[in-house]
Amino acid sequence: MTRRTALAGALTQAITADAAMSLRWRNLPELPKALGGQFAGMADDKLLVAGGSYFDTPSWSGGVKQRVDTVYALGPAGESWRLVGKLPHAVASGAAISTSRGLLCIGGQLDNGSSPKCLMLAVRDGLLTTTPYPDLPATISMHSAACSGDIVYIAGGQTTAQSTSALRTFLSLRLGDSAWRELPGLPDAGRILPVLIASGGDVFLMSGAELTGDPGPPAGRRFLTDAYRYSDQSGWQRLAPPPRPIQAAPSLEWKCTILVFGGNDGTYAPREFELREDHPGFSKDVLAYDIAANQWSVAGQLPLSLATTAVTLRQGEFVIPGGEDRPAHRSAAVLAGRLR
């Protein structure tokens, strides 16, 4: 290890140690509707939440997932959410990533199948604008997205809501190009809802869940505890594994550290239809992965477990809008955290 690398590792360790002591949370205005699986992120100075799903009746009581087409925005002053427009169709369980051009929404589940469509969302003069982007090579949902500069990546997912196997799909799109580029498939196993982060020109893939083929309910899943780093020069390289599975976990890169907020660790996954409303919720741990040191630590705690949503940076805070707080149950809470 070089002196420079050792110094970078020491600095990052100091950051993660400080995070454990000073991660503080507050509540922003609640979403107009409790949602999970929504597109969420920043477009210019506005926080957008688009699409998503909810249950009128829990799935274990025969309820059917309801998808929405609404797009809500929270402006920089943050007094209240405002309906700024609608998507072309009701959609959930896609992936979204904040870019310099707006919020890119990729794929997702429709009421009558899955979608290969990609839309860039922005808000101009208080109204939603939607710009079509190149279609995916195939329909996809339950995947993850990341962005490095003007290159967007997606990984994993499934072709339909009824799929019994997960995809090893790994694609990239340079904003402005006319088609997605196929990259070497994911290592080890196809997976749904992994952590996917781009940093310094490399892409980090962590955990998620492999579909085992058991239709359930709940559908059979093998929760993964692996991690990899991808570069065009070196391909996939194995990293230190996370201390627990981190499926459907909001995540971002912050000062050379990957922060992972909660997520489903699979502890109660086989018992979802047994526990029903008594499900205790997902993990509240905030994990930190030190990129330079290839090391994991616990950086703090969430006040509420939220999964199948996103985290984004807004005015120096980590913001998590809505999501599942337990299976088949959505939350309207919007958490804002800051490191002090």
Image (tube, grey):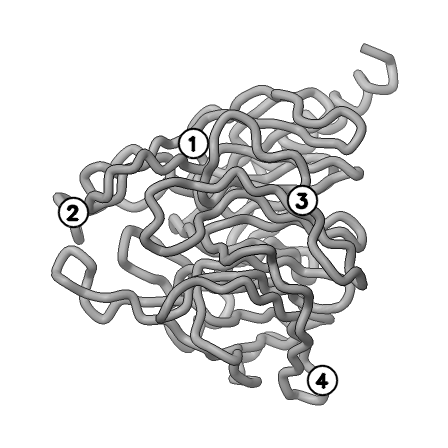
- Asked whether, in this view, residue 254 is left or right of residue 28, the answer is right
Q: CA distance from mark 2 to mark 3?
A: 38 Å
Label 4 crowd bin: few (<14), some (14–19), many (20+), radius 10 Å: few
Residue tagged 2: 273
Q: CA distance from mark 4 to mark 2?
A: 44 Å
Figure quadrant of residue 150: bottom right
Compared with 110, 303 (above or below) is: above
First reached walking from the N terminus: tag 4 or tag 3: 4
Residue tagged 4: 124
Q: Amino acid at mark 4?
A: Arg
Residue tagged 3: 182
Q: CA distance from mark 1 to mark 2?
A: 20 Å
Image x and y of residue 7, in percent: 82, 20
Q: Amino acid at mark 1?
A: Pro
- Asked whether, in this view, residue 284 is left or right of residue 204, the answer is left
Label 3 crowd bin: few (<14), some (14–19), many (20+), radius 10 Å: few
Label 2 crowd bin: few (<14), some (14–19), many (20+), radius 10 Å: some
Residue tagged 1: 245
First reached walking from the N terminus: tag 1 or tag 2: 1
Q: Amino acid at mark 3?
A: Glu
